[in-house]
Image (tube, grey):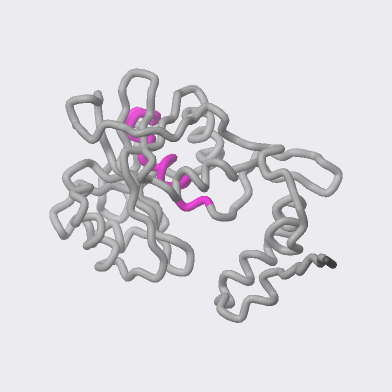
Amino acid sequence: TPTFILKTTYKDNFWLDEQYKRTIESLQFQDAVFYNVYGRGEWGVLDKNRIFSNYSVEASSTKPDDYDDICVGVDFGFNHASAALLIGKKGNVITVIGEVYAKGLTNTEFMNKIEAVHFHNYPIIADCAEPDRIKDMVNRGWNAKPARKGAHSVKHGIDFLRTHIIKIDGSAVNTAREIRQYQYKSDKNGNVFDEPVNFADDTMAALRYGCERWRVPSGQMKVLSGLRF
């Protein structure tokens, strides 16, 4: 019997919003491999420039006493996902115990989801680009503080994580998906740059923010919009 291959791209999907289309189109200026896969629908090897290989996806303990410390990392979004990760540290092992991950949420809706799984009971380090949303958390009585951003902060966060063993509980499906495809930018000539592709990386940002609790000495933290970290 005859066979055929039907090739479609994001341009054929009538349900995609304009913001997501612009995100896909921006990949052509970030990474040739990602654009070929997500923009052109071509086959590609997404782990060629993979950032993390020091991770596993496995059942993890939810008991606080099994960790030296626990915190929550938060990346805010709306058209792209909002992500909150419950993260535990035990020695040289960093564990993503659970996640909240959803698109199209107001800040109140996002906080309600965080509260429903009791993540708010732990220290929260959130994206400092959204001080008003952090203030909403503080006004709710949460211990929420801004992440520190600046020159090379992404690289330093990645370098810190690469010196640890990362475990991801099987329930954190979006974290597992994103860490598998998290990779460095490259051009059409195969040159690799020391900067991750800015695409489908919401949980990766939340993971970096949360780990600032252990990476950055408290004395180096700054004051942001009246919120001291």
Instruction: Say whether residue 68 is left or right of residue 96.
Output: left
Asked if residue 87 is positioned above or below residue 160 in the image, the reply reads: below
- In what quadrant of the picture does the C terminus appear? top left
Instruction: Say whether residue 23 is left or right of residue 114.
Output: right
Residue 177 belongs to the span the image colors magenta: no
Q: Position of residue 220 (x, y in %)?
A: 36, 33
Residue found at the far front of this picture: 1
Residue depicted at x 39% and y 19%:
92
Residue depicted at x 33% and y 18%:
91
Q: Where is residue 199 in the image (x, y as percent from the top left)?
A: 58, 55
| Along the viewing direction, whichever of 154 and 24 lies nearer the viewer | 24
Residue 214 belongs to the span the image colors magenta: yes
- In what quadrant of the picture does the N terminus appear? bottom right
Residue 60 in which image quadrant: top left
Asked if residue 49 is positioned above or below residue 85 in the image, the reply reads: above
Magenta-drawn segment: 201-218
Q: Where is residue 47 in the image (x, y as percent from the top left)?
A: 66, 39
Q: Does any portion of residue 133 appear in the rendered image?
A: yes
| Along the viewing direction, whichever of 223 and 186 lies nearer the viewer | 186
Q: Does any portion of residue 29 appear in the rendered image?
A: no
